[in-house]
Amino acid sequence: MAKEIRKVGVVGLGAMGAGIAQLCVEAGVDTVGREVSMDLAEQASGRMGHFLTRKVEKGQLQQDARDAAFARLSLTTDLADLAGCDLVIEAIVEELAPKQELFAELERTCAADAVLATNTSALSVTEIAAATSVPARVVGMHFFNPAPLMPLVEIIRAELSSDEAFDTAFAFAEKLGKHPIRCHDTPGFVVNRVLIPLLNDCIRVLDEARVSVEDLDAGMKYGAGWPMGPCELVDLVGIDVHVHASEALYEKTREPRMAAPPRLVAMRNAGLLGRKSGRGFYSY
Ligand code: CAA
């Protein structure tokens, strides 16, 4: 049975974490956002405030509802402030060791029945859960970028996840207005298992077919109905994030299509990371 969620913690307020925290406060849930410095936390809350204000300007949200939502967010650098949360969603760096360390710490901090969720996109939820003594309360809640706009959340059952933790995460995603789907903990889960090699194929086609970036994007938008082209999408996701996810999936599956194309690795190494660095396939 799903547990009622009155207070949520979001650890890591980068693009994904800030988007998730924004969804939580908009859904009427008190939310504690944790970053490593107050400076980073305030930058994230500034971005959230901006997107909420844009919704008011576009008539999608009332001013008082916007202010009430924003007031539900509190910021901290101290994990101890997550003690009263019924659910904590982790969205920190995509590395196993820091995530395991965090989950072990969350277990010491949070109530015994709090659900601990990871937003990992390519790591194993089961391996993250293994860092805790009660892995039954750990599940995956994988949001898509940009989290406030993309309807899907993958709810991932790790080897030892309890039905209660799984149902709680599923019900909470519905409360956020999302379309959750259920799956087991396998490399890339559902969407990235398909999307990552597909995007890698798209980048390989750039060189093989000697098509321009603009024409490849036009091809997939106007010939396959994608909302944005593959190069635009990799720029949005972040070239470093995409390369890292490709490497993680290649390591697990050994499927050649999972491996990041050399062109993307070179872009990552040169600091061409897409929108966030001002330059990727396009300039911003
Ligand atoms: N948070 C909140 N609001 C946001 C936002 C964010 N992060 N980013 C943009 N917005 C708001 C903006 O305010 C914007 O309005 P203004 O420009 O008027 O301020 C509004 O959203 C709409 O933006 P757009 O006009 O660009 O919207 P659109 O109709 O073109 O749709 C899109 C944008 C939803 C991103 C659409 O292009 C789309 O669906 N693209 C595909 C995205 C996708 O495939 N994502 C998955 C990536 S893979 C992944 O995430 C998996 C992983 O693990 C890496």
Image: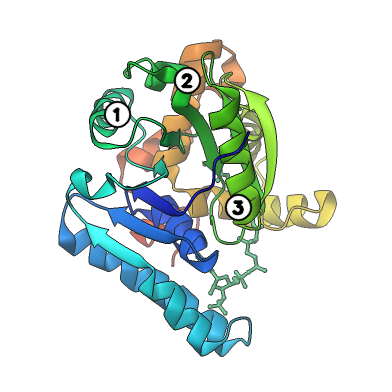
Report the disc number at residue 136. 2
Report the disc number at residue 107. 1
**If you read the primary sequence from the N terminus, does the residue marked by circle 1 or circle 2 appear first?**
1
Q: Nearer the viewer, residue 109 or 195?
A: 109
SS state under label 2:
helix
Ligand 1 lies in which image quarter?
Answer: bottom right
Q: From the image, which quarter does the C terminus lie in?
A: bottom left
The picture places residue 129, in percent across and down from the top left corner, at 40, 20
Q: Is residue 253 above or below residue 147?
A: above
Q: Residues within 10 Å of mark 2 (few under 14, many from 20)?
A: many
Three-letter amino acid code at disc 1?
A: Glu
Three-letter amino acid code at disc 2?
A: Ala
The picture places residue 93, in percent across and down from the top left corner, at 32, 38
The picture places residue 101, in percent across and down from the top left corner, at 24, 26
**If you read the primary sequence from the N terminus, does the residue marked by circle 1 or circle 3 appear first?**
1
Left or right: 7 in relation to 230 = left
The picture places residue 37, in percent across and down from the top left corner, at 16, 55
Residue drawn 44% across the image and 78% down it: 68
Report the disc number at residue 180. none
Task: Say which of marks 2 and 3 sits in front.
Answer: 2
Q: Is residue 273 visible?
A: no
